[in-house]
Amino acid sequence: MQETPPADIEKVANRAESIAKLGKVAAPALGLKDEKAALQILMQALNVPSCGPSKDESDRLVAALGTLMEIGPKGAMESLLAVQMMGVHNAALMFLRNATADGQDIEVRDANVLRAVRLMRLFLEQLEAMARLKGKTREQKVTVEHVHVYEGGQAIVGAVTGREEPPKRER
């Protein structure tokens, strides 16, 4: 049986310690109690294809956590939706970038623009869902009253206020 060299054991211990620290930071940042759930969501965010140039996992991890913190989810549902929003946003930008690449047929350009537009619409729907989850939606209030308007009559729909008279000037 082969023994694990002490240096490898130390690397594993350091990695486990770093992951535990990351869970302690990520959980409150995502509005979660469970550090393991926070790490899972953070790893999902890390796997979102990025438009950025960095291939370094630690750079992407910092960027993913920073983005999630800026979105400010308060719980699992908002955190999961935030990760989806990151993916949709990055995909939309990728298709926009592809649409503007040189030397393409118009059909390829159009297909990329269409995909980008669909993803941007989806992103707006996700924004609305996030606002509902956060309780930040403005509900429209409509008051319907029974009004009769007879032939030859006129009606005004909407808020009506009295017209202000211009101030009278003294002579």
Image (spheres, rainbow, N blue to C red):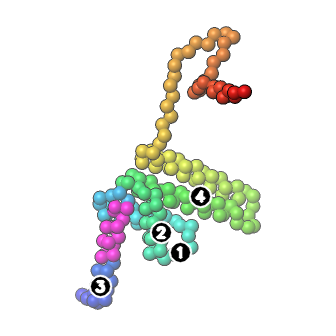
Question: Residue at position x 57%, y 60% from top?
Answer: 91
Nearer-N-terminus badge (1/2): 1
Residue 101 drawn in magenta:
no
Residue on which the image places disc 2? 63
Distance Cα–Cα, label 2 vs label 4: 18 Å
Mark 2, secondary structure of its residue? helix
- Do the residues under discs 1 and 2 have CB atoms within 8 angstroms? yes
Q: Residues within 10 Å of mark 2 (few under 14, many from 20)?
A: some
- Do the residues under discs 2 and 4 have CB atoms within 8 angstroms? no
Q: Magenta stretch: give its range.
A: 16-29
Residue 155 in the image: x percent, y percent?
Answer: 63, 18
Residue 20 drawn in magenta:
yes
Amino acid carrying label 4: it is Ala
- Do the residues under discs 1 and 4 have CB atoms within 8 angstroms? no
Residue on which the image places disc 1? 54
Distance Cα–Cα, label 1 vs label 3: 27 Å
| Image disc number at residue 10 | 3
Residue on which the image places disc 4? 92
Front residue (pair 116, 52): 52
Question: Residue at position x 67%, y 9% from top?
Answer: 151
